[in-house]
Structures are given as C-alpha cells and as structure tokens.
Amino acid sequence: MNTTATAIASAVRSGEIDPVQVVEDALTRISATDGFVGAFRRVRATEARVEAAALRQRADLARLPLAGVPIAVKDVVEVSGDHASWGSAGADSTPAADDHDVVRRLRAAGAIVVGITRVPELCIWPMSDDPDGTARTPWEPSYSAGGSSGGSAAAVAAGMVPVAHGTDGLGSVRLPAAMCGLVGVKPGTGVVPDPDAAGWFGMSVHGALATTTEDAALLLGVLANSPGLADTSEPERCRIALSTQLPALSLPAPARMGSAVHELGQVLAGAGHAVTSAAPRHSISSMLGLLTRWTAGPAEQAAAMRRTALQPRTRAHVRIGDEIRSRGVLRDSTPASWRARAAEFFTNHDVLATPMLAMSPPKARRWHRLPWLANVVQSIGVAGFAGLWNLAGYPALTVPVGHYPSGLPIGVQLVAAEGREDLLLRLAAELEQLRPWQRHPAAVGS
C-alpha cells in the first residue's frame, strides 16, 4: 500500500474514495502477502467491511483525521468481539464486550481495524513468533520483524496497512520499526491515556508505526488525544548529541550502526543544527533495575493467567520474576536516579541520537521453542540502546538511515527530554525531507 494514511483520510473525507474500497484493497494485500510475512494473528475481514460501510454514514466524516484508514492493532488491547491474547494460550479467551480505550479512540477518528497482529508471548521478547507463525521483515524474510510489536511493523512495511498501533515497554515499537525500515514512535509516560498504564511498572506505552513521519505523527496525535502532535513543520535549531557507545559499557556499537548515526549527524549539521558527541552518565544500577523489571513485570501479569499453558521460556522468565518480586529488590529510587541523570543531560542537549539496535537483527526462527537463555541473550543483545528510555519515561523514536548489504534497514534512535514528542517528530520530518527513505521493499511495494 504505497498510499499513506494521510492521503487516504483526505480522499475519504472529500468523497474521492469509498472507504469500503480502501478496506477491500487492504484485505486483498493481506491475503496476497501475509502468508510469508506472518504479521497477523487474526484478520477481521467481515467486521472491517461492515465497519467501512457504516463509516460512509457518519455525519462527522468530513472531520475525521483517520477517515477510512485501515489499521492493525497489537494483540494487547481488547477489540470488541475478540480477546487480547498477548500471544499466549494462557490468556482468558472470552470475547471482549467493549473496545479498549485506545481502539475506541482509533474508531472515533475514523480508522477501520482490519486485523490483530502477532506478538511474542507476554510481549517479553524482541522476536515475534508463536506456534501459528513467525513475523518476518519483508525486506529480507529470513530475518525477524522484531518485537514485541513485530506483527504491526511487518504489516506496515509490507504495505498491508499504512499505519499500525504498537506498545513499547523496552523498545517494542522502536526495535521492530528499525528492523522493518519504519518510523516508530514511543511517547513519554502518560502522553497516551491508558487505564492499564501501571503495567510493567509504568514503562510500557502505546505508540505508532508508519512509513512516513507525517503518518506516525497523525496516528500518535489520535492515540494521545492531542491533534497538535500531527504538526511536522520545521523544527527549531537543536543541540544534537551523537553517541555510539553501549550504555554503561565501554563497548562501541557495530560499525555500520555507528556509521548510520554519524551520517544522520552530518545531514542535520548541514541543516543548521549544532551536532556534538556526548552521552548521559549511565550507571550499572540503572541497567540492573531495567532487567529486574523486565522479569518482574511479566510475572505480575502472568498471575492472572494459566501458567501451565505458558511456553517453557516464559515460565522460566516468570519464575525469576516471581523471585525478584518476593525479595523486594524493586526500588523507586532506581528509575528516579536515572531520570535525574537524563534530565541533567538534556539541560545541555535537546536531542540524543544513538543506534537503535545494539547488534545485528535476529533471524526469523521458532524462538518460542528455544530455551530461555537463548532468548535472553538475543534480547539483551538487540535492545541495549532502547530500554533505559522506558525507565526514564522519555520520548524516543527511530527513523531509517540506510541499509545493510543484505538489504535489511538500519534505524537510528532519537531521544528528547520529557514532553518533547513534538520536537522529535518535527526533526524526523526534516530528516525525511533532506534524506528521503524507501518506504517499502520493491517486491511488496509495487
């Protein structure tokens, strides 16, 4: 689907395009493509057609920001008539009577939910596979689409939908966005209203995935009930810090990832921004605090599930999380200390640019069949630059900056101070204008 969400909504609002036809086109694309991409847990074909037909009759059609836009939602929010499985056979499968607040917001804005996307069990891992399939990046399907919003990223990158919903607890929007060549936005804590915001100790937030900054900003504005976020006009001149060192370690990022950060810095310096090399004062205690929450959060969630139905890797993860919770080692002082260091850094810099991934993307495998340790090693290796910004509650996004020789995209992460989602989006839009990226791989984008 080469047409953007912004263009679709404009055409539907004006009556140029019938929303039913838009949905039919999306369903045709899903039918032709998802067999090898593996993005969807469930396609809502019948329901989406009915909802698109009903949209024609809405009195407010001409004012809807997402009028007729086909969207995929991550399998963590309730869609009326279905259930949120969180990728697990241990979840309650009773169909939901009502939409989750996020889904309600999307529908109110005119979006049509065409499907529910694949996630790893309890969204723990940065690879999205389950017994029914594997989400693959369409740029090179032998590689994973990432996780835990991997199904959402794969659906957008393959052109099945123009935008998708995701959640990000330790990089779960940004990592798959980077692996699939997308713009992926993680807003700061509390920006997107959510009645379940306490999950994973408040680190997980709802975010947006798209092929353009304009579409990502449009979707985030709807999710956040903040239309002003859709403004992607030229940003103010910024103080941009580049860092390619892994947090809390004296190790450089892989060469091609580090080069992408410096390439981005050169482009932005040419646009008049002040670019330097600098990094926050990281600490081992912050990294340990992050890792303990990564196990304790899913353990807390699994308390309401049938644990015997969980995958072996997940049961092992949850057992460790139970032990951490019982020992009382989770302290509020850990994220508070890290937030203070982050705030100190952003008094002297407006934006931090880092690699998005800390190692090469993982292969597309049946990761859910592999032992816990194999999954942990891969997860920690990939997500080294991502999770601390969830612990801080600061906004971050990823943009595509080049490709590996294999064709896999490379993403660069941009981070800003609390409340500066607007700056990140406008800066990403400027970068996109200065150095446009290919929105879809040629094989699926035609």
Image (spheres, rainbow, N blue to C red):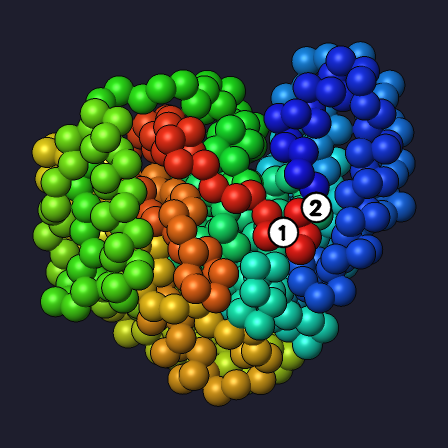
Q: Above or below — where is 140 with respect to 393?
A: below
Q: Quadrant of the N terminus?
A: top right
Figure check: 174 above or below 310: above
* Residue shown at 72% from the left, 38% from the top: 70
Residue displayed at 67% across by 33% down: 3
Residue 312 makes an appearance in the image: yes
Badge 2 crowding class, 10 Å Cα cut-off, few under 14, some 14 to 19, many 20 or more, is: few
Confirm or deny contact between disc 2 and disc 1 (CB under 8 A): yes
Please identify the quarter of the rendering in which residue 205 is found: top left
Label 2 and label 1: CA atoms lie apart by 6 Å
- Residue that numbered label 1 is attached to: 442
Q: Residue 17, located in which quarter of the rendered image?
A: top right
Seen from the viewer's position, the closer of residues 421 and 157 is 157
Task: Find disc 2 in the rendering and name its residue.
Answer: 446
Q: Position of residue 219 (x, y in %)?
A: 56, 32
Image location (x, y in percent) of residue 84: 67, 56
* Horizontal relation, residue 422 to residue 287: left or right: right
Amino acid type assigned to the residue bearing label 2 in the image: Ser
What is the x, y in percent for residue 410? 40, 55
Q: Could you tell me which secondary element the residue under label 1 belongs to? A: helix
| x and y percentages locating residue 321 in the rendered image | 39, 73
Q: Nearer the viewer, residue 424 or 180?
A: 180
Mark 2: secondary structure: loop
Q: Residue at x 86, y 33 (%)?
A: 21
Q: Residue furthest bottom?
A: 371
Q: Residues within 10 Å of mark 1 (few under 14, many from 20)?
A: few
Q: Which mark is residue 234?
A: none
Examine the rendering and report whether any part of residue 190 can be seen. no
